Amino acid sequence: MLYNYWIMYFNNKNNFFHGIMFHHFHDDGIHTKGQGSIDKDDFYKMINFIGRENILDADVFFEKFKNNKLKNNDVCLTFDDAIKCQFDIALPVLEELQIKSFFFVYTSMFENKPDSLEFFRYFRMNYFNNVDEFYANFYKVLDKDLKPFFEKSSDEITKLKIKFTHNSIEDIKFRLVRDNFLTKSQYEKIMFLMFKEKQFNHNDFSKKLFFQKSDLQTLNNLGHLIGLHSHNHPTLLEKLSAEEQKNEYEKCLSSISNVLGKEKNEIKYMSHPCGSYNEDTLQILKELGIELGFKQIMTIEPEKGMKKINNSFLEIARQDHADIYKRMY
């Protein structure tokens, strides 16, 4: 079912070819509603708002991109993180409307070692009344005076608020604490302490939250394009050494190749996890034969040496679905 909107999706801020980025979906069953999630009905409405005629199949977008034939109002749909709700809720809509999309997957889950990030999100959304209650509990367990850190980070907070318009100030502050104030192990230690307090056994939720190998194979067989998203999904990949980054993407490429039974040189697409990359990343991806890469936002990032929106074939802009949702409602 599609809906009619009088508001046009394209304007002077997004009138160039780009991807639309999706993560979380919810339903009345096992996939619970959470911060930033949409349901099937929202997804239908969003496709109509963008304009079905403007949405290219992933393979068509890729071929037109390579041949420099994309028009300003050409977009494609992309899905990050290999989250099971995408398969259960978004995929039937895509198949009904005959839209083939990009699915960018991190691959440690296929070794039964999924990154904890999705467990943390599920816990945050289902074991607290709201996200602010979660933040309060987290800071209580952390038990640190963060005022000096936030004062020192004021310019970064402002910059990130401009960059991630759909995030609240509290979301951004938490992200900075997670990524800059704490190490990964320190952050995970706090989260696992909170798991224990709430009696949350995250190991019971893997099949509910993540793709299985068979899901990836089904997507591939249906004609969707599968691409790289790192192996372990580091939130700040750009802070890793060149060797560590190379290991992340080589493992990801090998895993996807093995699961799909494809040659490595057949996998030519990727998206940057959390939009994090640097010159080392771009060089590594070029050496791996990647021919199309998506970033996470719709703006120029001068700190990355960008001079235009779609700065290179590995830095194609994407609109977060949460920003579109705000315009729709």
Image: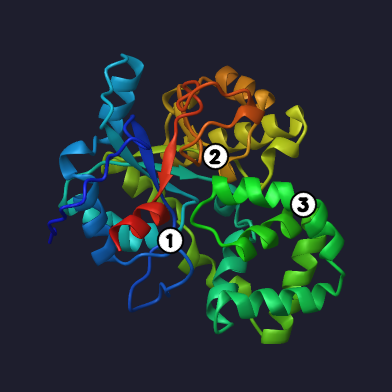
- Where's residue 267, x and y in %? 44, 28
**Callout 3: 10 Å neighbours few (<14), some, many (20+)?**
some
Query: Which image quadrant for residue 90?
Result: bottom left
Query: Which image quadrant for residue 85?
Result: bottom left
Do we see residue 76 in this rendering?
Answer: yes
Q: Residue at x 80, y 77 (%)?
A: 141
Do we see residue 183 in this rendering?
Answer: no
Residue toward you, 329 or 136: 329
**Callout 2: 10 Å neighbours few (<14), some, many (20+)?**
many
In terms of secondary structure, where does tag 1 sit? loop
Q: Which residue has dot 1 on it? A: 24
Q: Residue at x 58, y 74 (%)?
A: 131
Residue toward you, 15 or 260: 15
* Amino acid type at mark 3: Ser
Specify the label residue 153 is tagged with: 3
Q: Which residue has dot 2 on it? A: 255
Q: CA distance from mark 2 to mark 1?
A: 23 Å
